[in-house]
């Protein structure tokens, strides 16, 4: 579809939305994370989230009923990272599955040696390459309170990362960005962080970030929106690269 036609179509979707302003205001009011936004930005986020709700399919698993509040709480936080980008950044996949609690996906993982491992650990979230995003509702509810923790931002950061192939900690960068600078900033920070974790030094970042570069990017994206001061204090170069990527000032 041409760009102008797509914009017109999107405007129509927004105009015909059945979600009331009261429902939006309630959902926005619950998320401290959105307090820093101006009223224009809140309104742009609401439009983006309206498109998101229209384009995606929300499925409640294990008997969970997907209420308007669940829908909007997820949509608003999922759309925050793309507020200055575009809804197209979440293209090529459709479904969000919401669980009433932590879940154990029936699946296997194949490692780099081709060995198949069954997954038995309970999870609170997962993002599949070209596939759905899975979320545990109680953990979504804990998100958005500016404590540095945010399951929705985490899983959707993986989605952005996966846009140029498997998750590796580098989403598609904008034309004005320097690949070498991104790589240098993130690998310096990642090595420093892993060193601290190995030495049991106190760290202010979730140790899960030391798993691999993809998790490092996802956890630091949570911090970028939830606790930017801390991220900027610990890894200012990473903060700068994320600001260029997300095109938002979160400090
Ligand atoms: Zn992750």
Image (tube, rainbow, N blue to C red):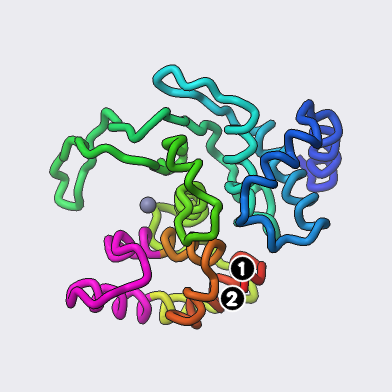
Work out how far the residue at label 1 is from the one at label 2, CA to CA, in angstroms: 5 Å
Residue 235 picture location, percent across and down: 44, 80
Q: Residue at x 18, y 77 (%)?
A: 199
Assess disc 1: are there few (<14), some (14-19) or many (≥20) residues with their C-alpha within 10 Å of its C-alpha.
Answer: few
Ligand 1 neighbours mark 2 (CB distance < 8 Å): no
In magenta stretch: residue 200: yes
Where is 172 relative to 107, above or below? below
Contact, CB < 8 Å: mark 1 with mark 2? yes
Residue 97 picture location, percent across and down: 47, 30
Describe the element under mark 1 as helix, strand or loop.
Answer: loop
- Determine which of the numbered discs, if any, sits on residue 157 in the image: none
Residue 131 left/right relative to 200: right
Q: Quadrant of the C terminus?
A: bottom right
Residue 212 left/right relative to 47: left
Residue 205 left/right relative to 38: left
Nearer-the-camera pick, 241 or 125? 125
Determine which quarter of the picture holds residue 129. top left
Assess disc 2: are there few (<14), some (14-19) or many (≥20) residues with their C-alpha within 10 Å of its C-alpha.
Answer: few
**Residue under pointer 2:** 177
Q: Quadrant of the N terminus?
A: top right
Where is 13 relative to 146, above or below? above
Q: Residue at x 53, y 37 (%)?
A: 93
Nearer-the-camera pick, 185 or 50? 50
Determine which quarter of the picture holds residue 16. top right
Q: Tell me which secondary structure the magenta stretch mostly adopts.
A: helix
Describe the element under mark 2 as helix, strand or loop.
Answer: loop
First to last magenta residue range: 187-216
Where is 225 relative to 136, above or below? below
**Residue under pointer 1:** 174
């Amino acid at each position: 579809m041409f760009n102008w036609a797509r914009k017109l179509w999107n405007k129509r979707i927004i105009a015909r939305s059945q979600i009331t302003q009261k429902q939006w205001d309630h959902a926005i009011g619950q998320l401290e994370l959105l307090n820093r936004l101006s009223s224009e930005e809140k309104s742009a986020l609401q439009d983006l989230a309206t498109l998101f709700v229209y384009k995606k399919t929300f499925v409640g698993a294990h008997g969970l009923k997907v209420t308007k509040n669940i829908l909007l709480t997820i949509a608003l936080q999922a759309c925050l990272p793309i507020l200055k980008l575009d809804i197209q950044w979440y293209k090529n996949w459709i479904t969000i599955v919401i669980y009433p609690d932590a879940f154990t996906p029936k699946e296997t993982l194949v490692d780099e040696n081709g060995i198949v491992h069954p997954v038995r650990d309970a999870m609170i979230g997962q993002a599949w390459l070209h596939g759905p995003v899975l979320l545990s509702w109680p953990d979504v509810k804990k998100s958005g309170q500016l404590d540095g923790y945010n399951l929705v931002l985490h899983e959707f950061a993986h989605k952005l990362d996966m846009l140029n192939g498997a998750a590796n900690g580098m989403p598609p960068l904008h034309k004005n960005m320097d690949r070498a600078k991104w790589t240098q900033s993130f690998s310096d920070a990642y090595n420093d962080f892993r060193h601290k974790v190995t030495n049991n030094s106190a760290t202010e970042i979730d140790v899960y970030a030391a798993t691999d570069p993809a998790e490092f990017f996802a956890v630091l994206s949570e911090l970028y929106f939830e606790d930017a001061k801390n991220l900027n204090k610990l890894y200012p170069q990473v903060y700068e690269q994320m600001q260029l990527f997300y095109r938002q000032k979160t400090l």
